Image (cartoon, rainbow, N blue to C red):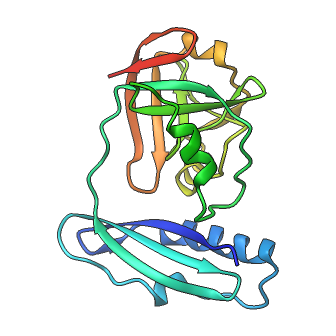
Amino acid sequence: MCRYFETIKIQNAEVCNLAWHQQRFEKTLRVLGATKTAYLQDYIEARGDGVWRCKVIYDKNGVKEVTYHPYTPRKITSLKLIDSRIDYPLKALDRSEIDTFFAKRGESDEILLVKNGFVQDTSIANVAFFDGDAWVTPSTPLLEGTTRARYLHAGRLSEKKITKNDIASFSKIAFLNALVDFAIMSIEKTDKDTLIVK
């Protein structure tokens, strides 16, 4: 049976943005045809000082495993633009297809997936771009992340179809996921298949 997961940030004993994870958890269970739901808060323990990565693994029958690891952010200075064929609408534990594309990054730190000419996501985060006036996020994401949903709901982001060629017109990129929240970097250079950020 396929398994799915939520990655939840715990910072200084506070479980962050749990309502948004609960919403996606319940949506996934409905798609899987589950007949009952559960409450993530019943399975999560608040950890102490620092930032913790809580991973809740589940299937249609409920929560199967919860793990905790101290979180250290990855350093990203370059992204390899890679044409993708991936469909990943649910946060599945099987990420083998994403990992296959990630292995093609060469000397870059991360990948930026592009499907049918339109920007999707990195291997670990949604993205947003600053056009000089506002932040926009691709309307063609690989996965609809909880942080992305939260910022869209708050009106701090808008959706737009973004092509590979559009990237050169943006001055900044942000990585969005539960652990980094909204991490902004300047776009230093673009060429046909590499994005340098700082």
Q: Is residue 108 left or right of residue 29?
A: left
Work out whether residue 86 or residue 189 is closer to the camera in this orientation and state it. Answer: 86
The image quadrant where one finds the C terminus is top left
- Vertically, is 34 above or below 178? below
The answer, for residue 153, to whether it is visible in the render is no
Q: Residue furthest left?
A: 49
- Vertically, is 105 above or below 140? above
What residue is at 48 percent from the left and 30 percent from the top? 105
Q: Is residue 68 left or right of residue 124?
A: left
Q: Is residue 75 left or right of residue 191?
A: left
Figure label count: 0
Please provide percent x and percent y for residue 86.
71, 43
Work out whether residue 158 or residue 148 is closer to the camera in this orientation and state it. Answer: 148
Work out whether residue 17 or residue 80 is closer to the camera in this orientation and state it. Answer: 80
What residue is at 38 percent from the left and 24 percent from the top? 107
Give the quarter of the image for residue 82: top right
Please provide percent x and percent y for residue 49.
17, 69
Please provide percent x and percent y for residue 51.
26, 62
Please provide percent x and percent y for residue 5.
56, 69
Give the quarter of the image for residue 27: bottom right
What residue is at 47 percent from the left and 90 percent from the top? 42
The image quadrant where one finds the N terminus is bottom right
- Vertically, is 15 above or below 81? below
The answer, for residue 189, to whether it is visible in the render is yes
Give the quarter of the image for residue 126: top right
What residue is at 74 percent from the left and 38 percent from the top? 85
- Vertically, is 148 above or below 114? below
